[in-house]
Image (cartoon, rainbow, N blue to C red):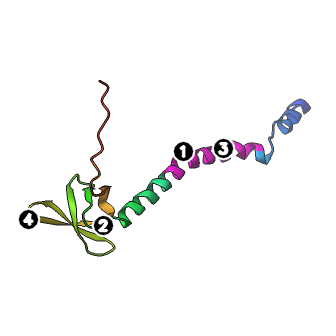
Amino acid sequence: MFSSPAYAQAAGASQASLLESFLPLILIVLIFWFLVLRPQSKRMKEHREMVTNVRRGDTVVTGGGLIGKVARVKDDNEIEVDVADGVRVRVVKSTLSEVRTKGEPAKTAKSDS
């Protein structure tokens, strides 16, 4: 005899049910969804709304850091932005990082003093 009956009984008793073995994996997926995927999709939706609502006269900030005023909305994907007197740049709408509407001041960081 190579194994005693006590070892054989202990091995059978330690097996967990299928639900208990997948429960940690399910919890990790739920936590990942609430902390990462859901907020990211909300941000993407807000950005898409912001880009579709851009209009002539708005002040925009591009992903590269250029700040200018929208001169013309060419089509669904492209706008023309005045960055200086007589300087007009074509910009792809999806590269906009911020849209400041007419008369809206720039966002400033609060100081501790």
**Which disc number belongs to residue 86?**
4
Q: Residue flagged by tag 1: what amino acid is it?
A: Leu
Q: Amino acid at mark 3?
A: Leu
Report how far apart the C-alphas of labels 1 and 3 lie in the structure: 12 Å
Using the image as rendered, state which of residue 20 and residue 51 is in the foreground: 51
What residue is shown with label 3?
A: 27
Query: Mark 4, mark 3: which one is toward the viewer?
Result: 4
Can you identify the residue that label 2 sits on?
55
Q: Amino acid at mark 2?
A: Arg
Q: Mark 4 vs mark 2: which is more N-terminal?
A: 2
Position of residue 82 in the picture relative to residue 102 (left or right): left
Q: Name which residue lies at 27% across and 48% down.
A: 105
- Find residue 3 and report its horizontal and vertical position in percent: 86, 33
- Please, what is the three-letter code of the amino acid marked with disc 4? Gly
**In the rendered image, the vertical position of residue 13 relative to residue 86, given as above or below:** above
Per the model, the C-alpha gap separating discs 4 and 2 is 20 Å
Specify which label sits upstream in the sequence, 1 or 3.
3
